[in-house]
Image: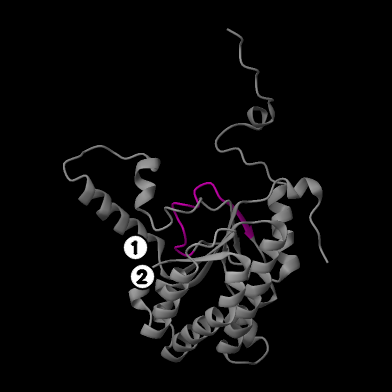
Amino acid sequence: MLELTPEEKNNLPRHVALIMDGNGRWARSRKMPRLFGHRNGVENVRAVVNAAKEVGVPYITLYAFSTENQNRPKDEKSGLMKLLEEFLKKEFRSMMEDGIRLRAIGDLSGLPDFARKIVEDTIYETRDNDRWNLTLALNYGSRQEVLQAISKYGQDNPASDHIPTWEEFSPYLETSDLPDPDLIIRTSGEFRLSNFLLLQAAYAEIFVSPLHWPDFGRDAFIKALSNYAQRERRFGKTSEQIQQPAQPLASS
């Protein structure tokens, strides 16, 4: 079982966002229907969330269903929504015991009534949990999120020609009560963000795994965290500036 070094444990991301890709290809490689891949992908969510708790990553966001996924076949979409309902029913007790708060981003009105209800009910029931944070991106698209945020900002500032700062604008995003992601993991070897957290990911590190999502288990997640811990995050500065020790304050 792969483990982090003490040095790596001191340099972990606070917020990891995951693009869970490859369920269909995983199933096809086994000559099984796509829904078989999605079901195994749901099982893997448990492994990754548990790994995040194990090492102390307090925020996890999962790209579960995009606005573009509405173009999938009707039976696949229906199956995905039933899997979502099943997952939340099964995990509710452990979410309460472990102190996991559920959030959702995206247009929940585009979900079937039964799926929207269990998501909203679980969000409400876990609202006071404060140890861990799980966010599901459901019927979510970053471009739509940004356009809605611009509209809301304009409604609140109708006469202003001031260009807002990030600190002024970001509260209008759906992720306003979450830290920006430090690390975005995408599985199945695809090198794109697919309309996911486009503004919030401005300074995120990106890790792409060749594994399809159902195979991206605990050790693969730990490997991604290890890779992140060894990176130097400069935020526009030089390596020399980052490595330079802080100067002591001058005495008065």
Q: Amino acid at mark 2?
A: Asp
Residue 144 has which mark?
1
Where, by quadrant of the figure, is residue 164 drawn? Answer: top left
Q: Amino acid at mark 1?
A: Gln
Where, by quadrant of the figure, is residue 51 drawn? Answer: bottom right
Image spot of residue 57 (x, y percent):
64, 56
As rendered, which of 146 and 122 lies closer to the eye? 122
The residue drawn where x is 51% and y is 61% is 193
Residue 220 has which mark?
none
Residue 107 has which mark?
2
What whole-number distance in Å separates the C-alpha atoms at marks 1 and 2?
9 Å
Q: How many marks?
A: 2
Image spot of residue 108 (x, y percent):
37, 73
The residue drawn where x is 74% and y is 60% is 223
In the image, 7: left or right of 157? right
* Comparing labels 1 and 2, the label whose residue is closer to the camera: 2
The residue drawn where x is 70% and y is 59% is 224
Could you tell me which quadrant the C terminus lies in? top right
Residue at the far right: name it: 1
Residue 168 visible from this viewpoint: yes
Q: In the rendered structure, which segment of residues is drawn in magenta?
A: 194-207
Q: Is residue 205 highlighted in magenta?
A: yes
